[in-house]
């Protein structure tokens, strides 16, 4: 492991904010801030069932994943036309660039929107146009991962895949999101096999609220390359060994875990334990508009709560680039940016 000169606790938040990083687990619908939600509702002649932005934000208190998903789903009702999807993604991409995210892989789903009468191509084209602009105007590379909703049937996932295929070139991968408990990965074995045959990169949420068995079946049945969340893996020593041996990345979302009560406090989060075990963990924001912060907020709050160091920060940023679905030469460029940043980081003498 690369050894770094120590950075004082006082300067760590600045290092975390300025550090180049990739974000690999965020749902674009979960970046829809209340202000934009109200603006899109007005533009589309719709109403949000809350009197104002503050009262909506006050409703963002959740006891578990399902309570969040219900509110999150209601928020998506304001998204009607391609420009809405563009505006939502563009707002996130600007925010990510400000957090020194150099590359992001954005989750979205089409089933929520087709369920409201919005066609899949409207969703994909709006999001993709924002990704193209992010590269051109922000120097931020962004790609799209279509998530199936696991509370729906596998037949419905096949339908979503079919609808997306004319726009195959605008997508890098396929994922699995929504209510985890009672919907194990193997429910989607056939549709993931089809996606694999079509050369999609594969990921799945597993081990957020669900047991280690769901992580095993995401790996062995769905054959995913990354596990989203995966925090329950630490309950199973054989699984830890497997994840370490195969260097399977885990996209961890600490503020999400706090808000959805996967851990009672951030100080009890197991991110430090995951890194100590040699797991390829990364830090991500999941649904930043709902969980109290974008990626840098996840880094700074978690590092403060767990007493993590600049060494851990380097490892997490390095993991984020290594775990990304970009080609080897683009990966090299991002790794070099990280190394250059650590060579020159000096909070005292900066200009
Ligand atoms: N878990 C599962 N599904 C989701 C999440 C999550 O954290 N966020 C948005 N959809
Ligand atoms: Zn998620």
Image: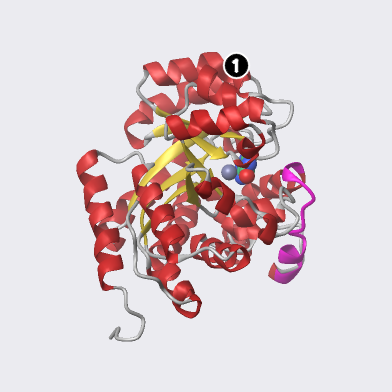
22 displayed left or right of 138? right
Q: Which residue is drawn at 67% across and 49% down?
A: 72
Location of ligand 2 given as a quarter of the image: top right
Q: Which residue is drawn at 65% across and 36% down?
A: 178
The residue that disc 1 covers is: 155
Q: Residue at x 52, y 48 (%)?
A: 276
Q: Is residue 60 visible?
A: yes
Q: Can residue 79 be seen in this view?
A: no
* Image coords of residue 149 (percent x, y): 61, 31
Q: What stretch is highlighted in magenta?
A: 54-66
Front one among 204 and 132: 204
* Image coords of residue 195 (percent x, y): 43, 21
Q: Quarter of the image containing the C terminus?
A: bottom left
Front one among 238 and 156: 238
* Image coords of residue 54 (percent x, y): 72, 71
Front one among 103 and 230: 230
* Image coords of residue 116 (percent x, y): 63, 37
Rendered position, 246 above or below 59: above
Farthest residue toward the left? 329
Quadrant of the rendered structure where residue 247 is? top left
């Amino acid at each position: 492991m690369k050894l770094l000169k120590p950075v004082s606790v006082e300067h760590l938040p600045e290092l975390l904010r300025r550090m180049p990083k990739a974000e690999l687990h965020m749902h674009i619908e979960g970046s829809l801030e209340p202000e934009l939600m109200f603006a899109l509702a007005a533009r589309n002649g719709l109403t949000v069932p809350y009197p104002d932005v503050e009262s909506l934000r006050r409703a963002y208190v959740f006891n578990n994943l399902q309570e969040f998903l219900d509110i999150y789903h209601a928020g998506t009702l304001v998204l009607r036309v391609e420009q809405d999807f563009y505006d939502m993604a563009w707002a996130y991409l600007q925010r990510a660039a400000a957090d020194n995210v150099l590359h992001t892989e954005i989750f979205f789903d089409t089933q929520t929107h087709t369920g409201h009468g919005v066609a899949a191509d409207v969703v994909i084209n709006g999001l993709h146009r924002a990704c193209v602009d992010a590269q051109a105007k922000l120097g931020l590379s962004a790609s799209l991962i279509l998530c199936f909703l696991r509370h729906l049937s596998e037949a419905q996932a096949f339908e979503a895949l079919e609808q997306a295929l004319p726009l195959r070139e605008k997508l890098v991968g396929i994922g699995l999101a929504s209510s985890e408990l009672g919907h194990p990965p193997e429910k989607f074995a056939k549709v993931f096999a089809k996606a694999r045959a079509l050369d999609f990169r594969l990921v799945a949420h597993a081990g957020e609220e669900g047991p280690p068995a769901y992580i095993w079946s995401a790996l062995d049945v769905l054959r995913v390359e990354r596990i989203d969340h995966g925090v329950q893996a630490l309950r199973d020593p054989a699984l830890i060994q497997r994840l370490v041996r195969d260097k399977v990345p885990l996209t961890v979302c600490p503020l999400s875990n706090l808000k959805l009560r996967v851990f009672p406090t951030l100080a009890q989060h197991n991110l430090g334990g995951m890194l100590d075990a040699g797991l390829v963990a990364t830090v991500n924001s999941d649904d930043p508009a709902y969980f109290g912060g974008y990626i840098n907020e996840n880094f700074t709050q978690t590092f403060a709560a767990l007493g993590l160091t600049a060494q851990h920060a380097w490892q997490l940023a390095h993991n984020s680039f290594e775990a990304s679905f970009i080609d080897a030469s683009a990966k090299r460029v991002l790794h070099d940016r990280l190394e250059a940043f650590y060579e020159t980081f000096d909070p005292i003498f900066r200009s």
